[in-house]
Amino acid sequence: MKTYDIEIQRLKSARHNHGLIELGVDVLVQPRSPKDEQAVISCLSLAVDDARTLLILLKQQIAEIDKLNPRSRRSGRC
């Protein structure tokens, strides 16, 4: 399995598209060498300000998705 270091340099957009949340981002993707692997995972890193922005964008997109569900399914008890 290939693993990568992914650095988000800039968040550009977020939108809901047929059940998926699509994020527009500028990223730097570099393969991680096998000797650097402590576990078989890829690493995503972003600045605190970008993380806060990402959280706000995700909350907005999830709120839009919730509006599309019938009121009886919004409680999360499905």
Image (cartoon, rainbow, N blue to C red):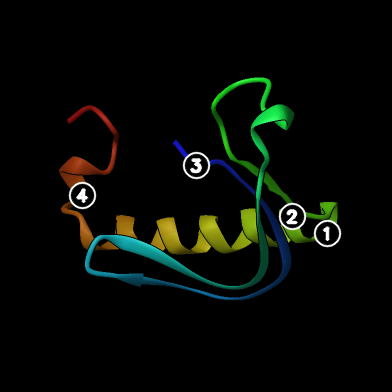
- Give the image quarter of residue 16: bottom left
Give how far across and how far down residue 39 sits, in percent: 60, 21
Left-right relation of 13 to 75: right
What's under tag 3, amino acid-wise? Lys
At a point 53% along the width and 55% down the height, the residue shown is 59
**Looking at this view, is 77 or 43 the one in front?**
43
Q: Nearer the viewer, mark 4 or mark 2?
A: 2
Label located before the other in sequence (4 or 1): 1
Give the residue pinned by disc 2.
52
At a point 70% along the width and 62% down the height, the residue shown is 8
Label 1 crowd bin: few (<14), some (14–19), many (20+), radius 10 Å:
few
- Residues at marks 4 and 2, CA–CA distance in whole angstroms: 29 Å
Q: Circle 4 — which element? A: helix
- Mark drawn on residue 49: 1
Label 4 crowd bin: few (<14), some (14–19), many (20+), radius 10 Å:
few
Q: Circle 2 — which element? A: helix
What's under tag 2, amino acid-wise? Arg
